[in-house]
Amino acid sequence: MTVSDEFRRTPISVLVRRPLHSVSLDTPLRDAIKLLREENVRYVGILQGPRLVGLLTERDLVKRAYGSDVGPDTPVSEIMNASPRTLHPQDSLQTALDMFDLDRYRHVALVDDRGRPHGVVTIRGIMHFLAESVPETVLNLPPDPTQAAATPEGA
Amino acid sequence: MHCPICDYENLPGVDQCGDCGWEIGDADVPTPTDALSALLLETQIAEIATPAPLCIDVDAPVAVALDLMREHNIRALIVMQEGALVGILTERDLILKLDPWDPGTTRLVSDLMTPNPIVVKPEDTLGTAVHRLCVDNVRFLPVVDDQRVVGIVALRDVLHRLVPTLTG
């Protein structure tokens, strides 16, 4: 099976590595940012009851919170990306690939038929899947002894 | 590493065959076996990099960096000091180290940046970029040629180049 066949046939749910960290609509921004930092994630889901109604990403914060008059007690509902596009866990990797490339998404939440979240897939997850599909070409490259970052970016 | 001349099985990474002395330094370099491998091994980073990335001085206030990122709708800035690359400032750095309600006027780029970022060369391959992005867990790779920053490659740029082959 070629890699493109794998992308067509593999359900997107295989890329979910951990549950979606979530908060409720009225959660203060301060607490949402604390969660982003503590869990080392780039997004949090916003729930209304059991249903996913929004995503709050790093991008949302940089565009709408920094440099504005938003205070630490502002509810996340004022900053979040409401009604985000989602995928079903049984959708294919190919579907996610199109969303990441054509629609320029970086994170897509998976929700079931009742709107309940089942994790998030990321553009990085797609890249890891690809790298693991062709390890001899990508992952087995020799290390470069002349450079090494002390920490990953942001750490 | 298999010697193509005498069949001797050498240790990986040796330059010469331990039995016959044949130069086998390139014998373990992967060769393309399909369209995706060919793309990864033969495409140079210079072909996909965004040239002339936006840079900021290491001593600039963070507020200036934020304005630049928002104005140009970009997620990372190259940080320079006296013409040399010294760091990268990403959205991730801001989220982790700066609160939105902190005016930021007293913080400098040097306080928040990630120093000594992983870099690639223009002649490196797409496979090298994927390797760096996955193994080193970064999203942006400054492209450096002879100690000069000539471009930047984002994870999205790499994926965009791969998509036609992945969906073909």
Image (cartoon, rainbow, N blue to C red):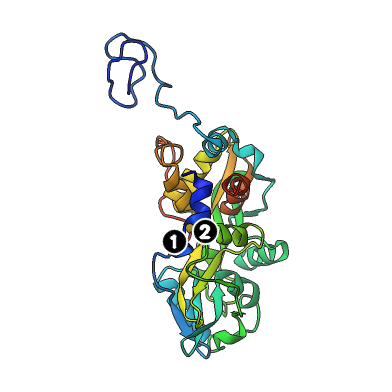
Amino acid at dot 2: Leu
Q: Chain of mark 2?
A: A
Few, some or many C-alpha atoms within 10 Å of disc 2 (few <14, some 14-19, many ≥20)? many
Marks 1,2: beta carbons within 8 A: yes
The percent position of residue A78, horizontal first and vertical second, equals 61, 86
Badge 1 local density, few (<14 within 10 Å), some, or many (20+)? some
Q: Residue A129 location in percent, x, y?
A: 45, 52
Chain for disc number 1: A
Please say if B120 is above or below B58: above
Residue found at x 36% / y 19%: B15
Q: Name the disc covering residue A93, or none.
A: 2
Q: Is residue A93 visible?
A: yes
Which secondary structure lies at badge 2?
helix
Residue at 55% in and 76% down: A56
Residue under numbered circle 1: A15
* Residue B116 appears in the rendering: no
